[in-house]
Image: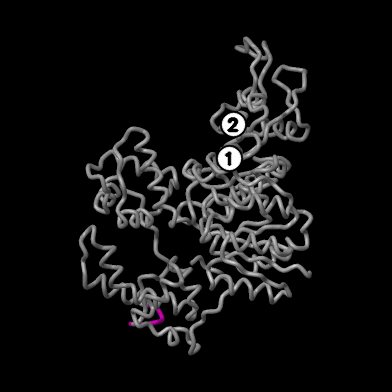
Amino acid sequence: MTDPVLLVEDDNSIAIVISAALEAEGLRVVRCETIAARDEALRDGRFAILLTDVILKDGDGIATLGEVRACHPDMPVIILSAQNTLDTAVRATDTGAFEYFPKPFDLDDLVRAALQAISERAGAQAQAAHDAGTDGETTQLPLIGRSPPMQAVFRMITRVLRNDLTVLILGESGTGKEVVAETIHQLGSRRGNPFVAVNTAAIPAELIESELFGHEKGAFTGAVARHAGKFEQARGGTLFLDEIGDMPMQAQTRLLRALQSGTILRVGGREEVAIDARIIAATNRDLGPLIQAGKFREDLFYRLNVVPMKLPPLRERGADVAALATHFLNGAAQDGLPRHRLSDAAATLLSQQYWRGNVRELKNFIYRLVLFSREETIDVGAVRALLDETGGPAPVPPPQGAIDAGEHGDHGFEAALGRWMAAHEPANGDIYASALAAFEKPLFEHALRTTGGNQLRAAEMLGINRNTLRKRVNELGIDVDGLSGRGAPGTSSRQILQP
């Protein structure tokens, strides 16, 4: 390949690592830091592929891709972004980008994607850039979260927006399956038509066929007129079949036939009616055991499981709790309740709880907080009082053995925790600040020891920026060489962390 790669990245450390990895594959890399420099480079030469960050010194790397597409419609684009929101993922998809990588990302994955994009250059289709009003819609998008599990969900959503493939959403109750289904509908090509949701577990078995497929007048006692079922009501739009794992077997058979034939037959009717609705199904049950027990049709499962999408429970996305809580506080204000904000310590306490009811339980808890709080700022004391009053949720249980001294004896984080808890009894509202000050150094030492002195992995483990870790390591006088066990800090990694 004679044409080089154009890399638009204003973070020097990230650009160096990406360039080295691509050059190791025999690619030439031209790097620039601004949109203006990018455009100048594109005017002066040809490039095999464009890799671009979103937030650049002189503008938005996505918003300005329209002109690039117009002049270079066959050049694949890979978008890198630390702005890890659903809006960014959707905007990246709207540009026709070959791939979107939220930071942090795996460097090997990026290199593979770049090589694939170059080899499939003709397959990258030009699409219109997102209109100028996209930024203003960010807060209107219903899905909240920047944690890695939610990034995987966002990326999967963007892959199904431009097609009508059947989607099966899996996840515990309260994780937001219907919200995801409606998001796919609202962002897809069918958004101008109905979104019809039906809880298949809530409809009596004797009525579910009539509800889904409709009935003719006189089909059964009480059928005084023709009734259009959910399939017909969703014509041109999306039909969301919730709790599909609880659908009666007879209705499963009828549903399978409808999906196979593309038509439905009203109860008591003889005329086939063509289906024109995207199907999205969801369940909080494991369908594998149901299939083995003969309670769910295996052939129906394969009809529905074209694009499986697993939603993470809230306990696996603790980093999103604060953002979700703020979102619900704003929603409560829009519903006529007083406007409040969370203190940082209160948000931290919320993120440490085990939300068995997932996002739904968190939302209800926030609304109760708003109802009972008198102060504009909801502090940790108010959160703890409501937790005690309601009896839950319980704190996330620590890893096995986290309170024991462990193999590191008197020098590990666990030992420091035990000594500090024995010596201090911090008052409610002061535990977080006191513990942070006492445990920061042993906590960092624990993370570095666990990762063999690899600061990139330690920063990821702690959920902090690598530069922040390095700064605090120097300030606290931590001997990384000694903790690595190899005499040198392990700073090599194939993962790029956001700056």
The residue tagged 2 is: 195
Query: Horizontal and vertical percent for residue 478?
Result: 37, 82
| Between 92 and 356, the one nearer to me in the picture | 92
58 versus 203 height, above or below: below
Hey, what amino acid is under mark 2?
Phe
Question: Which quadrant of the structure image shows residue 443?
Answer: bottom left
| CB within 8 Å, label 1 to label 2 | yes
| The N terminus - image quarter | bottom right
217 versus 244 height, above or below: above
Residue 7 located within the stretch drawn in magenta: no
The local crowd at label 2, few if under 14, some if 14 to 19, many if 20 or more residues have their Cα within 10 Å, is many
275 versus 362 height, above or below: above
Question: Which quadrant of the structure image shows residue 352?
Answer: bottom left
Query: Horizontal and vertical percent for residue 89?
Result: 58, 51
224 versus 170 height, above or below: above
Q: Which residues are magenta?
A: 406-410
Left or right: residue 334 versus residue 164 is left
Q: How many marks?
A: 2
User: Between marks 1 and 2, how big is the CA–CA gap?
Assistant: 9 Å
Give me the residue at 55% from left, 51% from top. Answer: 88
Hey, what amino acid is under mark 1?
Ala
Which SS class for mark 1?
A: helix
Q: Earlier in the sequence, mark 1 or mark 2?
A: 1
Q: Which mark is residue 103?
A: none
Query: Horizontal and vertical percent for residue 463?
Result: 44, 65
The residue tagged 1 is: 181
Q: Is residue 197 visible?
A: yes
Give me the residue at 64% from left, 40% from top. Answer: 295
Q: Farthest residue in the bottom direction?
A: 487
Left or right: residue 473 versus residue 227 is left
Classified by dominant secondary structure, the portion drawn in magenta counts as loop
